[in-house]
Amino acid sequence: MTKAEIPFRDIAIETASRETIARIQLEGLRRQVAQGLKTDFYRKRFAECGISSPEDIGTPDDIRKLPFTTKGDLRDAYPFGLLAVPKSEVVRIHASSGTTGTPTVIYLTQKDLDRASDTMARSLMAAGGTKDDVIQNMMTYGLFTGGLCFHYGAELMGAMVIPTSAGNTLRQLRFMKDFGTTMIHATPSYLLHLHAAIEESEEISRGDLRLRKAITGAEPHSEELRRKIEGKLGIEVYNCYGMSEMNGPGLAFECVFRSGMHVWEDRFIAEILDPDTLEPVPEGGTGELVLTILCRDAMPLIRYRTRDLTRFIVGECECGRTHRRLARFTGRTDDMLIINGVNVFPSQIEEVLLRTNGVGANYFIVVEKEGVLDRLTVQVEITPETFADDARVINALRDRLKAEMSALITINPAIEIREPGSLPVSEGKAKRVEDRRPRE
């Protein structure tokens, strides 16, 4: 792809100098501090940090003077403690899909929605989307931002959008065939389920479809899983990062070169900090992603601890964008499993499974107590061909998985080989882990 062919929505902003980005961030950060001072929550927090005016922020680095915000803070401020505008100016609310108990809610004015849509349109164009695309959105519509916020951005780009939402796989396939869907938005696990449905269908084959790209989000996945989906569906798969607290998908997005996700730094400040000390990690080091939104009037959110672990990719992207890139996430500080004193991330287990021939797409991780020790069990489906083989082949596969996982995570797991199709399949966000240990 030549430079002239690289797609941009706003080339001046997307290729701006670091000095220009810093100036935009300073202006945005001051605006958010001003909005925060309109809320009881931040007014109190800022006072504790000695911040009484936006003018107390002199450079983008002064963000370190400001307090952190957590998901617990959002719950404590429910329902209106973080609202910075009159309720009459709010046109929509969304809530985090992963919340239990008191929800974490965000509020949006019409201007906020317009900016969120523009951010999403920019992201889709960076991934090669155009107004000629037919985009089928297979994410749940409603309080979850992955449906409506993605939808509005795709429409702003000029694409034809089919809001099929999640589930009803046979209808999804019918619409893909009849309307010539070229791009889909779905979870990685649902894409694998979609492929299985195509393979089983007597009416629709892969040759009937015009699909060329998929945008994945809502659940973490490995590079191995991306390649597996691409191989099965014969398409390009793009990684997208977002969260309801930050207006949903489009916060960071892969461009056509797919070498990390560009964070739109004119609209967000991204920090990567040591999760224990909350100090910046060395350049290129892995840490917790902390985010500040710079362009939302209804609800400022400053130094929000995402609990997601990642790193900045050092160097420039071939596309010419100057906004920094995030590497694929390696886990979360709060879904990390501590097993007999060892930190284990489900993504490490997935990495082994997806690079092993004979292993199917579905797996499940169970953690239990066995006496005073923890026991880790990985239930994994194998392919029909492997299942039909003799016991020696299956036992050899089990031993190989056990050895490779033990080498990677330093824990000796139990491996349960399961028949193809025997583990539950989720059409939404996949549940991969069940921790059955008693709570102390």
Image (spheres, grey):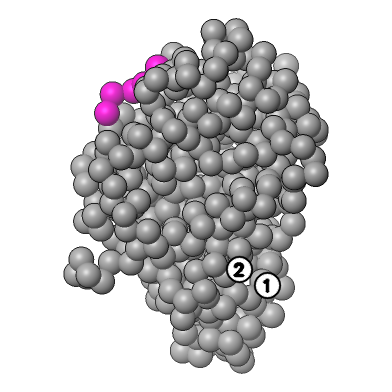
Q: 393 above or below 24?
A: below
Q: Residue at x 39, y 38 (%)?
A: 24
Within 10 Å of disc 1 (Cα), the crowding (few <14, some 14-19, many 20+) is some
Identify the mark nearer the N-term, 2 or 1. 2
Do the residues bearing badges 2 and 1 touch, measured as CB atoms within 8 Å? Answer: yes
* Separation of residues labelled 2 and 1 (CA atoms): 6 Å
Residue 332: x and y in percent read 51, 34
The dominant secondary structure in magenta is loop
Q: Quadrant of the N terminus?
A: bottom left
Q: 35 above or below 89?
A: above
Q: Amino acid at mark 2?
A: Asn
Give the structural element (helix, strand or loop) at label 1: loop
Give the structural element (helix, strand or loop) at label 2: strand
The answer to whether any part of residue 9 appears in the image is yes
Residue 361: x and y in percent read 52, 61
Q: Residue at x 75, y 45 (%)?
A: 89
Image quadrant where residue 313 sits: top left
Q: Residue at x 75, y 24 (%)?
A: 76
Label for residue 347?
A: none
Image check: 111 left or right of 107?
left
Q: Which residues are magenta?
A: 279-283
Q: Amino acid at mark 1?
A: Thr
Give the residue pinned by disc 1. 164
Q: Nearer the viewer, residue 253 or 403?
A: 253
Residue 107: x and y in percent read 70, 42
Label for residue 137?
A: 2
